[in-house]
Image: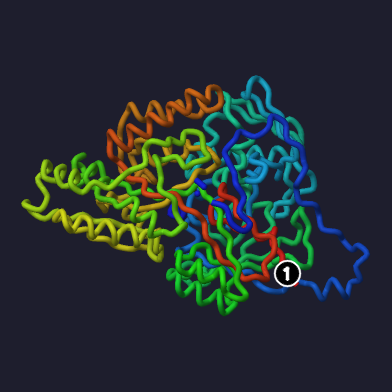
Amino acid sequence: MRWHKRLLVAWVTGALALTASACAGGQVRGAGGTPQPAASGGSQPAATQAAQANDSTFVYVPNLDVVTDWDPATSYSNEIVALSNIYEGLTRYDSESQKAEPRLATEWTSADDGKEWTFKLRQGVKFHSGATLDAQAAKKAIERTIEKKGGAAYIWDSVQKIEAVDAATLKFTLKYAAPLDLIASSGYAAYIYDVDAVDPDGKKTAGTGPYTIDSWQKGKETELTLKAYEDYWGGWKPEQYKKVAFRVTPEITTAWQLLQKGEVNFVQRLNPQLFAQAGTTEGVRTAQSPSFQNLLVLFNTASGPARDIKVRQALQLAIDYDGLAAALKGSGQKASGLVPQGLLGQISDMAPKQDLAKAQALLEEAGYGPDNPELKLSLTYAQGDDDQKLLVTLLSTALKGLNVTLQAKPMTWSAQWDLGKKQGQDIFVMYWYPDYPDAYSWFVNVFKSADKPQFNLSYLKNAEIDAAIDKLPQLTATDQMQARQSFQDLQKKIITEQAAVAVPYVQVYQRALTDDVAGYVDNPAYPNVVFFYDLTRAS
């Protein structure tokens, strides 16, 4: 995924939906809106407080394995749903204000036209290790992440120097202007942690967040459980959830049954039929919100039959984009280019259309088609994802009429990703969403040349495209008009000229929760993340 990256983040409103658009945040942000420590006593009698205590476990149901990497520096996959509750960054993106808001930093300023940033750190914060958060500790964490060069460490590429001015002041000098307050809100690689306490085996945590690991059993149905970090700087109230479990349930129908029985509290994704049913089911409520998450159908440009651009172009044309969008019944919107609506670089005139006659002509030029030898193509997609399965079913049917057999295999994300890094398939289906609300993530991660593929699973290598990608961050900070044009030009090169990918739809998140959960808000900048600390059990 990254959720595959990704299961695994443009945009529909519903109960609890919040509309967000990318922006660089203000030049100066205050401390408003941050959680306040829970009162130590107050006027409420102790007996009443005890009666309101929430002893239940909040059970989250993912459809794929949760943790692939415990290191907060290199983590870049499904574990965002857990690590976002264990670790914190200097800021967090707020989808209502559409800005980066305070987290471990309470305020910040920028100078020198965005090439110098100074953050004031929150006082009284402890790491799970017991160490105290100060500027030196934050500096070490970011520098370690940069040095590791894993996951989304690229988000710090603009940084030239980090200084701990004093215990509460962190100063960044940049090589070029960049929106560092927004970058610091990234769902990956922006965590502040105790570098001396990092445990790659998941036996302990080194963050400042409200939860720590209780147990981790890779491969088990209940893979991961979390418990409250009692010394969390935000404090605790009796009605908050102090226990969390991730119960891996690949089949959506099973997850739905568990929700109806009250055995789980949150299902991250239902198919349209079940989502409609959930809306009228007693004890259940639904939440629908727009996302930054789109589906990518990546074609192997390096080896196999899809190495021929005519085959890739034919595959693009064989997808029934309109039929797929209609069948999704509101859970997905037809895409136009790589960049979802709401982000700089979105392009409105690239909505694709199925054209089977043209697809057949291209296949015949490549030596395939109805009157030629059968073409067999291997495809991998996410186990338990009904939307991806629908895409595969429609595409298989369309290709069959062109004498192309699609050998499609649903897989767990870890297995699919491992195979993809070995160039083991012709077509790789996955979701993508940005690391922070900026379109750069699609280009630098998925389409920039890589000797050892991570998420560049079309294996595209193009020096002209690489050079244009490298210029995007500075252009975004200094010349948004030119940045918009560059984003659009790149999409045309990658999708039209190189035919490296097809982008069928952008997801609309459709969640289901037990109706005794209060405080849930979907944030498209942190796809599929539930911030458990913000929830309470309704009385």
Q: Is residue 298 left or right of residue 357?
A: right
Q: How is the image coloured?
A: rainbow
Residue at the extreme right:
43
Residue at the extreme bottom:
261
Residue located 30% across and 45% down the image:
353
* Quarter of the N terminus within the rendering: bottom left
Give above or below for 380 relative to 442: below
In percent of width and height, residue 9 lies at: 50, 49
Q: Is residue 164 visible from the viewing direction of this image?
A: no
Corner quadrant of residue 190: top right
Q: Is residue 498 visible from the viewing direction of this image?
A: yes
Q: Nearer the viewer, residue 395 or 179?
A: 395
In percent of width and height, residue 6 lies at: 44, 53
Give above or below for 211 relative to 487: below
Q: Amino acid at mark 1?
A: Ala
Q: Nearer the viewer, residue 95 or 474?
A: 95
Residue located 46% across and 57% down the image:
331
Residue located 57% across and 47% down the image:
525
* Quarter of the C terminus within the rendering: bottom right
Numbered disc 1: secondary structure: loop
Q: Is residue 164 left or right of residue 358?
A: right
In percent of width and height, residue 231 lies at: 76, 58
Q: Which residue is mark 1?
A: 538
Give above or below for 468 relative to 238: above
